[in-house]
Amino acid sequence: MKRVVLAGTTYVVAIFSAGFVLGVLRTLVLVPLFGALWAVLLELPVILTIAWLVCVLILRRWPLSSSAAAGMGAGAFSLLMLLEASLSNLLAGRSLTEHLALYAQLPHQLGLAGQLAFAVFPWLNRAVQLSE
């Protein structure tokens, strides 16, 4: 259990940090040039590639069973959602209700789809390792 928590926490901290940097670049550079939807579509493959590579490194460092890897992803997703809602409140002054309302917009729905992929990556990575 300790390894699952450590791996999941490391995973979310690394990806949240990368996502924060990419989010600033998206907001300041890509959104003014291309609009919100295209900015997310350009950012999404980059952050998902980073997430996959980080996931691979973490699972090499702390090998987990398939079920433990699924737990790592679920825990990391939960923490990511909490961090994102907190950041939304701190930087934009949004309430939790206002933050959740953002998911009615397509760019935020795509972001959520990416976050769900992030959550599945540990389990998927383990499945790929088992098939090799």
Image (cartoon, rainbow, N blue to C red):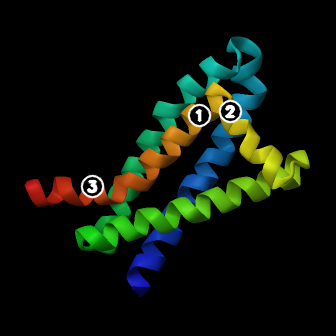
Which comes sooner in the sequence, label 2 or label 1? 2
Q: Quadrant of the C terminus?
A: bottom left
Identify the residue at horizontal 68%, vertical 32% (top origin): 104
Residue furthest to the bottom: 2
Q: Nearer the viewer, residue 35 or 53?
A: 35
Determine whether the residue tagged by mark 2 lies in a helix, strand or loop: helix
Residue 125's label in the rendered image is: 3
In the displayed orientation, state which residue is furthest to the right. 93
Left or right position of 124 against 1: left
**What amino acid is at disc 1?**
Gln
Q: Name the kind of residue labelled 2 in the image.
A: Ala
Classify 100 as above or below 127.
Answer: above
Q: Nearer the viewer, mark 3 or mark 2?
A: 2
Pointer 3 and pointer 1: residues touching (CB < 8 Å)?
A: no
Residue at the left extreme?
132
Give the labeled residue for mark 2: 104
| Residue at (44, 55) in percent of width and height | 119
* Residue that badge 1 annotates: 109
Vertical position of residue 32 compared to residue 12: above or below: above
Label 3 and label 2: CA atoms lie apart by: 30 Å
Cβ–Cβ below 8 Å for labels 2 and 1? yes
Tell me which label, 3 or 2, sits earlier in the chain: 2
- In three-dimensional space, the C-alpha distance between marks 2 and 1, rounded to whole angstroms, equals 7 Å
Name the kind of residue labelled 3 in the image. Asn
